Image: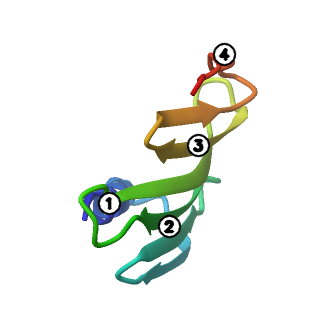
Amino acid sequence: MKCLLLFVALFAFVAARPEVEIIRSESDVQPDHYSFDLETSDGTSRHEEGVVKDAGTDHASISVQGSYSYKDETDGKQYSVSYIADENGFQPTGEHLPPLPSIEH
């Protein structure tokens, strides 16, 4: 549900900018997983997949993998971020981001 709200918020943000058009929008929402892809005319793109882990138990959670990219309006550079969000938190990576500290189990 949170991901659906995030998708709706992203869609509203894009829709609020009339000069930006949605070029591609695809989604697949199932009870145990989801995925979506979004691409706009300004070079922004977003992809995300989520899977429910341990469904039906007290320890059910969702594991998410995704990426997004955008063109910065001030410097004109294209930036890309890949991420994982799971029991270890949100873990983004990108050439412009500092490396994440190692997580030891």
User: If you read the primary sequence from the N terminus, does the residue marked by circle 4 or circle 3 appear first?
Assistant: 3
Question: Residues under labels 4 and 1: Cα distance?
Answer: 31 Å
83 or 58, which lies in front? 58
**Tag of residue 83:** 3
Residue 17, by quadrant, is bottom left
69 or 28, which lies in front? 28
Tell me the mark number nearer the camera, choosing from 4 and 1: 1
Tell me the mark number nearer the camera, choosing from 1 and 3: 1
Q: Callout 4, which amino acid?
A: Pro
User: If you read the primary sequence from the N terminus, does the residue marked by circle 4 or circle 1 appear first?
Assistant: 1
Q: How many marks?
A: 4
Question: Residues under labels 4 and 3: Cα distance?
Answer: 13 Å
* Crowd around label 2: few <14 · some 14–19 · many ≥20 (10 Å): few
Tell me the mark number nearer the camera, choosing from 4 and 2: 4
Residue at which label 2 appears:
21
Provide the secondary structure element on which disc 1 rests.
loop
Residue at which label 1 appears:
60
Label 4 close to label 3 by CB (< 8 Å): no
Residue at which label 4 appears:
98
Q: From the viewer's perspective, is 22 left or right of 96?
A: left
Residue in the image at 47% along x and 35% along y: 88
Q: Is residue 41 above or below residue 56?
A: above
Residue in the image at 32% along x and 60% along y: 60
Question: Residues under labels 1 and 3: Cα distance?
Answer: 20 Å
Provide the secondary structure element on which disc 4 rests.
loop
Label 2 close to label 1 by CB (< 8 Å): no
User: If you read the primary sequence from the N terminus, does the residue marked by circle 4 or circle 2 appear first?
Assistant: 2
Q: Callout 3, which amino acid?
A: Tyr
Q: Callout 2, which amino acid?
A: Glu
